[in-house]
Amino acid sequence: MLALKALFIKSQKISTVIFDEIDTGISGEIAGKVANKIYEISLSTQVISITHLPQVASLSKNHLKISKSIKGNRTYTNVKELSLDEKIYEIAQMISGDKVTDSQLQYAREMVIRN
């Protein structure tokens, strides 16, 4: 699906594209290839990508964390642009879950800095 969308985006000269969890159900090497394809698209088109994959998130120029909370009967959405250190921590959390170790932080840092 991503390959077809990439061709369509290029041929139609679309200025902005939103990928809403286009990477669902993949991991490992395939996730890296999808991340690289999304990055390639971003070189000529603005890309907004909603993802839970560290491979995709690590390639972002800007990283926004979106969270929601419920207070009473209302749902609130919070959007925060992350600093470099916050981005690294968030990616480490994507890798590990709730408990982030020094080695996961180091790996996340390597993922972000190499890009």
Image (tube, helix red, strand yellow):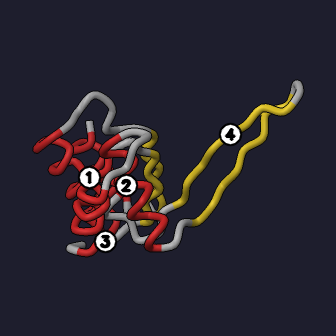
Residue 68: which disc? 4
Identify the residue at image location x=17%, y=50%.
Answer: 32
Q: Looking at the image, is mark 3 or mark 1 earlier in the sequence?
A: 3
Q: Are marks 4 and 3 in contact (CB under 8 Å)?
A: no
Q: For mark 1, what is the residue? A: 55
Residue 43: which disc? 3
Q: Looking at the image, is mark 4 or mark 3 earlier in the sequence?
A: 3
Residue 65 occupies which quadrant of the picture? bottom right
Rendered view: 62 above or below 69:
below
The amino acid marked with disc number 3 is: Leu
Q: Looking at the image, is mark 3 or mark 2 earlier in the sequence?
A: 3
Q: Residue furthest right?
A: 72
Residue 91: which disc? 2
Question: Regarding mark 1 in the picture, which secondary structure is present there?
Answer: helix
Between the C-alphas of marks 2 and 4, the distance is 19 Å
Q: Looking at the image, is mark 2 or mark 1 earlier in the sequence?
A: 1
Q: Residues within 10 Å of mark 2 (few under 14, many from 20)?
A: many
User: How many numbered marks appear?
Assistant: 4
Tell me the quarter of the image containing the C terminus: bottom left
Between the C-alphas of marks 2 and 1, the distance is 9 Å
Q: Estimate the x, y position of residue 36 in percent, counting from the top left.
A: 20, 58
Q: Residue furthest top?
A: 73
Between the C-alphas of marks 3 and 1, the distance is 17 Å
